[in-house]
Structure formats: C-alpha cells, structure tokens
Image: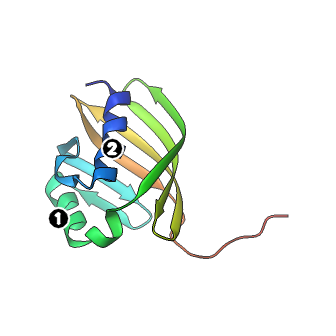
Amino acid sequence: MELKKLVKEWFEIWEKGDFLNLPISENFKHTSPYGTIQGKKEYLRLIEANKDKFLGHHFEIHDEIYHNNRACVRYTATHEDSVLSVSEWYFYKEGQIEEIIAYYNIEEERIKID
C-alpha cells in the first residue's frame, strides 16, 4: 500500500476506534513529548490501558507532505472539549508504518504573541 493511503487509513482507524487494526509494523516506534514507545505490542497495550484518552477524537488535516518513504502531516485533534494541534512525521517500510515522531504541546498554558 502506498504511504498516502496508509496515512489516510491511520486517521480513519483512529476515528472509528479500531486501534487493533492500525497499519503498524511489529517494530513500530512512536516518539512524542511523553517519550518513546518501542514495539507494536507495547503501543497497543498503552492504548488499551488509556482508551479514554486515545479514542473518540476527530481529526482535521491541514497539511500533508509526502516524499519517498516518509510523510509529514499537520492536523488538529478534537475530543469532547479539548483541542490539540499536532505535527507528525510518518516513516513507511514494507507496506506498514514503521515509525511516527509527533510534535505537540502537552501543557495547557497559552502563550500570547503580540
């Protein structure tokens, strides 16, 4: 499967809450401001234990860049009354997502820019 379709599937699966069918490799690695999770089993275990935080989001895609085996997607995730702006890098290998590096602010503080 090409990377663009894979990333689209990634977001569709998250919106459905069907996380057990995420198109990730066994060696999947996810890095975020919270740290790095290594391995598909560990990633799925973390989601299972925190379903209330991970599931139920709606995603609005703002920008997508695709080149060879990687993509960068900027989006807004909304969940109940929370909104999170995210930029993520996706790395593709042999038909699956091998790695994601996510950038977002996990603090509730707002910075005023004049």
> What distance separates the C-alpha of mark 1 from that of mark 2?
20 Å
Between residues 17 and 47, which one lies in front from this camera angle? 17
Q: Which residue is mark 1?
A: 45
Q: x and y percent of residue 70 in the render?
A: 40, 32
Report the amino acid beneath label 1: Arg
Q: Secondary structure at mark 2?
A: helix
Q: Is residue 109 above or below residue 58?
A: below
Q: Position of 31 compared to 19: left or right? A: right
Between residues 99 and 58, which one lies in front from this camera angle? 58
Report the amino acid beneath label 2: Glu
Kindly report which numbered mark, 1 or 2, lies closer to the viewer in this rendering: 2
Query: 10 Å neighbourhood of mark 1: few (<14), some, or many (≥20)?
Result: few
Mark 1 vs 2, N-terminal side: 2
Q: x and y percent of residue 57 in the render?
A: 40, 59
User: What residue is at 27 percent from the left and 60 percent from the top?
Assistant: 37
Count of numbered tags:
2
Q: Which residue is mark 2?
A: 12
User: What residue is at 33 percent from the left and 44 percent from the top?
Assistant: 12
Image quadrant occupied by the C terminus: bottom right
Q: x and y percent of residue 90 in the render?
A: 38, 40
